[in-house]
Image: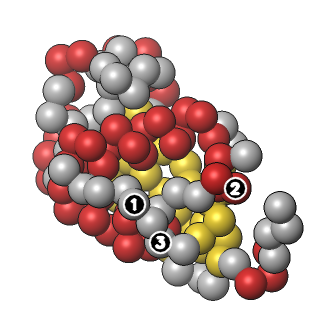
Amino acid sequence: MAFPLKKKRLAWVDCETTGLDPAKHEVIEIGIVRSDGVTLSRKVLPKHIETADPEALKINGYSGYDWDRTAKTAEVVAEEVKTILRDCLIVTQNAKFDYGFVEALFREAGVDSKGVWTAASCA
């Protein structure tokens, strides 16, 4: 299947999480840079910090104080992410990891991911 890249916006996505398992852990920070210059950088307020891997929190520089002051809820961030990623070809360092966590963020927030991912996005 031909996929005309010059007609698609690209979106680079990076997630920082409370661990490695999207069924158990959460996105605590997400960054997106689109090829048209649009960017998004958000801290996400964790709902289940008790399930976090302490090593992941250390690696990601998690501070309850900073997150409580500056983070947005999963619901707010998921809507922002859906809007910025719509109709983009998504590029990640580790597609399975980032896809799994963004999907988990959408589920947790009750946001439908329809229109965000395409088959080519996770190839």
Q: Quadrant of residue 55?
A: top left
User: Which residue is disc 2 drawn over?
Assistant: 120
Residue type highlighted by circle 1? Lys
- Estimate how packed mark 2 is, as few (under 14), some (14 to 19) or many (20 or more) residues with alpha carbons within 10 Å: few
2 and 3 marks in contact (CB < 8 Å): no
Disc 2, SS = helix
In the figure, 64 relative to 76: above or below? Answer: above
Q: Quadrant of residue 75?
A: bottom left
Residue type highlighted by circle 3? Arg
Q: Locate the N terminus and report the quarter of the image it occupies.
A: bottom right
Indicate the position of residue 51 as horizontal and vertical percent values: 24, 16
Disc 3, SS = loop
Residue type highlighted by circle 2? Ala
Report the Cα–Cα distance between label 2 and label 3. Answer: 14 Å
Numbered label attached to residue 114: 1
Q: Earlier in the sequence, mark 2 or mark 3?
A: 3
Indicate the position of residue 46 as horizontal and vertical percent values: 21, 37
